[in-house]
C-alpha cells in the first residue's frame, strides 16, 4: 500500500526462494565500498526514528503479507492494524530488528563479523519456526518505511545499496536456517523433535 516495492513487488525484487536455492541466495554479493558509505550516511538519519521505522515496517509487513502473522504468537489473531501500531510488543520486536540492522551497518567494514551475525540469526530463526521465505519481505518493508524519512536524500542508488545489503544478509540468514535445520534433523528423530510452532519471534 503506497510503496511499489511492497506486496508483489517485494517478491520480485528480493526473490522468494525455496530451500533448494537458499545456498545460491547466500552467495549474494556484499555491498560495494560506495554502497557501504551511502548506507552508513543514510543510517545516521534513519536511526533517529528507529522505533517509528520498526513499527511502520511490521504493520506494513502484516498488511502486505498477512500470513507472516502466523509466525508471531502474540500477533496471530490480531486483525486491527491500528491496534498493532500502539502495541508495546510490536514496538519491542521492531526495535530488536532495527538493532540487528544497526549491528549489520556497523559491521559493513568487517564482513566476516557481519556474516557470523547473520548466520547466527538464521539459526535462531529455525527455532522460532520462522521460515526463510519471510526474511526478504522485511527488507522491502524497511525500504518503504525509510524512504519518506530520507525525503530528497533518497536516490535509486541508495535504494540499490540497501537492497544489496538485505539480499546479502537474508542470503546468509537462509544459509544459517538450513544449516541448523540439517543439524537438528541429523541429531534427533522426528518423534523426539519438539514442536515449537507457538513460539513468538
Image (spheres, rainbow, N blue to C red):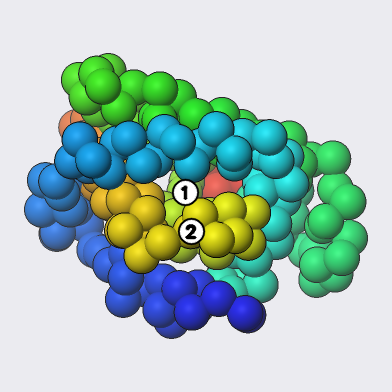
* Quadrant of the image containing the C terminus: top right
Which of these two is toward me, 16 or 152? Answer: 152
Q: Is residue 140 left or right of residue 92?
A: left
Disc 1 marks which residue? 130
Figure check: 48 above or below 106: below
Q: Secondary structure at mark 2?
A: loop
From this viewpoint, is residue 133 visible?
A: no
Q: Residues within 10 Å of mark 1 (few under 14, many from 20)?
A: many
Give the quadrant of residue 15: bottom left
Answer with left or right where residue 31 lies relative to residue 138: left
Q: Position of residue 200 (x, y in %)?
A: 64, 41
Residue 28 drawn above or below residue 196: below
> Which label's residue is closer to the chain start, 1 or 2?
1
Q: Give x and y (percent) for residue 168.
A: 25, 45
Helix, strand, or loop for circle 1? loop
As drawn, the residue found furthest toward the front would be 152
Q: What residue do we see at 87% from left, 65% from top?
A: 82
- In front of the other: 8 or 34: 34
Find residue 88 and report its image quarter: top right
Could you say which disc has been placed on residue 13 in the image? none
**Residue 133 position in % (x across, y down):** 37, 60
* Residue sitting nearer the eye, 200 or 161: 161
Q: Is residue 166 above or below residue 80?
A: above
Q: Nearer the viewer, mark 1 or mark 2?
A: 2
Amino acid at each position: 500500500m503506497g510503496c511499489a516495492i511492497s506486496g508483489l513487488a517485494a517478491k520480485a525484487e528480493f526473490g522468494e526462494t525455496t530451500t533448494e536455492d537458499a545456498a545460491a541466495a547466500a552467495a549474494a554479493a556484499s555491498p560495494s565500498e560506495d554502497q557501504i558509505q551511502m548506507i552508513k550516511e543514510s543510517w545516521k538519519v534513519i536511526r533517529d526514528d528507529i522505533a517509528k521505522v520498526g513499527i511502520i515496517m511490521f504493520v506494513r509487513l502484516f498488511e502486505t503479507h498477512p500470513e507472516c502473522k502466523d509466525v508471531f504468537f502474540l500477533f496471530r489473531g490480531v486483525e486491527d492494524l491500528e491496534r498493532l501500531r500502539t502495541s508495546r510488543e510490536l514496538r519491542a520486536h521492531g526495535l530488536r530488528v532495527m538493532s540487528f540492522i544497526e549491528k549489520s551497518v556497523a559491521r559493513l567494514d568487517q564482513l566476516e563479523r557481519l556474516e557470523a551475525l547473520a548466520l547466527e540469526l538464521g539459526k535462531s530463526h529455525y527455532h522460532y519456526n520462522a521460515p526463510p521465505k519471510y526474511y526478504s519481505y522485511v527488507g522491502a518493508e524497511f525500504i518503504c518505511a525509510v524512504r519518506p524519512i530520507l525525503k530528497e536524500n533518497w536516490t535509486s542508488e541508495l535504494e540499490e545499496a540497501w537492497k544489496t545489503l538485505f539480499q546479502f544478509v537474508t542470503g546468509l540468514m537462509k544459509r544459517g536456517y538450513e544449516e541448523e535445520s540439517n543439524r537438528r534433523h541429523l541429531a534427533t528423530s522426528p518423534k523426539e523433535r519438539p514442536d515449537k510452532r507457538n513460539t513468538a519471534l
